[in-house]
Image (cartoon, rainbow, N blue to C red):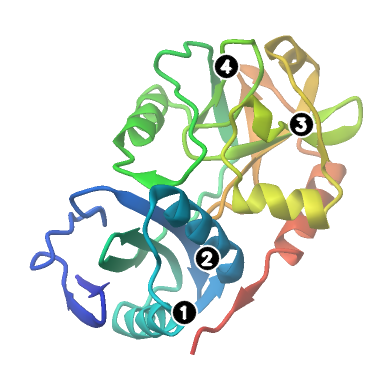
């Protein structure tokens, strides 16, 4: 597998990058959907990466280097639908582009209220094993994601996703103050699609009649059930999904 390392393409094994696309060490990262050689919402992802790198005390490469790396990598490792991961640490920039398997079935969600195993994150950093292990546990139980509950009983986020919930006919998502990563799709649905930010308690989940899993890869995935309780996927849900897709922009980096 070819990856981009600093200023050139190289073999992933030579750069000590795992088959899953993760390097050794620590840093910040962004995971971005690609489609037919175009990248979704690169500007938003780069702003978040810049904020995270600044918080960690190092600088990102200049934009020309990053765009050149992405353009070269997409040409070297083309995918109809891809997962582009940009990883930054002090003195190192790695980009990995791999196939993304589109999820076509509505998601089944579990609810996890153990704050000791679900720590909140405010920056997108690696190693990322803790969140990936949570996701794997859900998948081993035949589920697709988990809804995390913080110590105060507030709904936060998933292992690797944010959520939208329909309660009393209104689409809402949880506030950052609950311990939620400022997700790219979360920002899009709030700013462009009319979703409201409001505290949601664990007890409020019983009033949810429809929901979406949102992320930079999934975009907007309908939810079939929460903790075994079946939810609706009606015309309102289909209209919101179409609106989210239409407002998630993709661009060429060439």
Between discs 1 and 3, the one toward the N terminus: 1
In front: label 1 or label 4: 1
Between discs 1 and 4, the one toward the N terminus: 1
For mark 4, give the secondary structure: loop
Q: Residues within 10 Å of mark 1 (few under 14, many from 20)?
A: few
In the rendered image, the residue lying farthest to the bottom is 254
Q: Residues within 10 Å of mark 4 (few under 14, many from 20)?
A: many
Name the residue rendered at 56%, 26% in the picture. Answer: 109
Q: Is residue 19 left or right of residue 30?
A: left
Disc 1 designates what residue? 63
Asked whether the residues under the numbered discs 2 and 1 touch, taking CB atoms below 8 Å apart as contact, a structural biologist would say yes
x then y, percent, for residue 249: 67, 70
Q: Name which quarter of the figure residue 15 lies in.
A: bottom left
Taking depth in this image into account, of 15 and 246 the one nearest to the observer is 15
Name the residue rendered at 81%, 58% in the picture. Answer: 192
Disc 3 designates what residue? 210
Disc 2 designates what residue? 46
Q: Residues within 10 Å of mark 2 (few under 14, many from 20)?
A: some
For mark 3, give the secondary structure: strand
Q: Is residue 84 left or right of residue 173?
A: left
Q: Where is 63 relative to 187, above or below?
A: below
Quadrant into which the N terminus falls? bottom left
């Amino acid at each position: 597998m070819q990856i981009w390392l600093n200023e050139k393409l190289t073999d992933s094994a030579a750069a000590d990058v795992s088959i899953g696309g993760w390097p050794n060490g620590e840093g910040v990262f962004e995971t971005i959907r690609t489609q037919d050689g175009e990248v979704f919402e690169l500007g938003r992802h780069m702003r978040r990466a810049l904020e995270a790198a600044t918080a960690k005390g190092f600088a990102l490469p200049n934009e020309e280097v990053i765009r050149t790396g992405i353009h070269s990598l997409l040409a070297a490792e083309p995918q109809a639908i891809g997962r582009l991961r940009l990883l930054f640490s002090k003195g190192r920039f790695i980009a990995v582009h791999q196939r993304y398997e589109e999820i076509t079935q509505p998601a089944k969600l579990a609810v996890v209220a153990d704050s000791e195993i679900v720590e909140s994150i405010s920056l997108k950093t690696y190693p990322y094993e803790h969140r990936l292990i949570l996701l794997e546990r859900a998948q081993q139980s035949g589920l697709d994601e988990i809804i995390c509950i913080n110590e105060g009983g507030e709904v936060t986020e998933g292992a690797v996703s944010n959520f939208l919930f329909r309660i009393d006919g209104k689409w809402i998502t949880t506030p950052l103050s609950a311990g939620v990563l400022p997700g790219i799709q979360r920002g899009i649905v709030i700013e462009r699609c009319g979703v409201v930010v409001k505290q949601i308690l664990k007890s409020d989940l019983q009033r949810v009649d429809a929901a979406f899993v949102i992320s930079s890869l999934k975009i907007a995935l309908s939810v079939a059930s929460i903790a075994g309780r079946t939810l609706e996927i009606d015309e309102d849900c289909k209209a919101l999904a179409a609106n989210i897709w239409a407002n998630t922009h993709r661009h060429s980096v060439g």
